Image (cartoon, grey):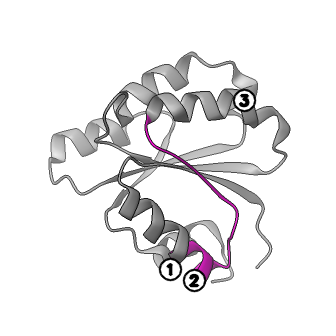
Amino acid sequence: METNYAFLVIEDNQIDQFITKQLFKKILDISEINIVNNGKEGIKWVCENRKIINESLIILLDIQMPIMNGSQFLLEYEKLEDELKRRTQIFMLSSSLDTDEIENLKSNVYVTDFLNKPICVKEFGKRIYSNL
């Protein structure tokens, strides 16, 4: 499958990182997935890599992480120059059932959508690729 996206997964759980990477490879035929362990590393990755990536960027952002969680990431992301945020979609990931937290994050201007963990990769693929 031809992809027009670069992918960044911001997730602290190594098992979830591995499973996401394997499922993306198997179901969506995507082998190039960038993974960082927390929001601070995610901001650093965006600052160092976004200008050299021509594709649209999809960020899968976990909510609960040490060092810098998903909400803190969004606050720092908002401060970045517009060029770094161009053609980027952020999907929040969580196993949380806290509806107030979910609605608050969904209302963030940078958040495209909320996905429950474990992520259903096939359904996610349908959201980003019309030919699935």
Q: Quadrant of the C terminus?
A: bottom right
Please give the label number shown on residue 48.
3
Please give the label number shown on residue 39.
none
Rounded to the nearest whole Å, what is the CA distance between mark 2 and mark 3?
A: 29 Å
- 62 in relation to 132, above or below: above
- Callout 3: SS: helix
Task: Judge from the rendering whether residue 2 lies leftward or rightward of residue 80; answer left or right.
Answer: right
For image coordinates 17% across by 40% down, the residue present is 100
Q: Are marks 2 and 1 in contact (CB under 8 Å)?
A: yes
| Numbered range of the magenta stretch | 23-38
Amino acid type of the residue tagged 2 in the rendering: Ile
Residue under label 1: 122
Q: Nearer the viewer, residue 98 or 24?
A: 24
For image coordinates 36% across by 43% down, the residue present is 106
- Callout 2: SS: helix
For image coordinates 59% across by 83% down, the residue present is 26
Residue 45 is situated, as x and y percent measured from the top left of the image, at: 63, 34
Which mark sits nearer the N-terminus, 2 or 3? 2
For image coordinates 56% across by 16% down, the residue present is 79
Amino acid type of the residue tagged 1 in the rendering: Lys
Amino acid type of the residue tagged 3 in the rendering: Glu
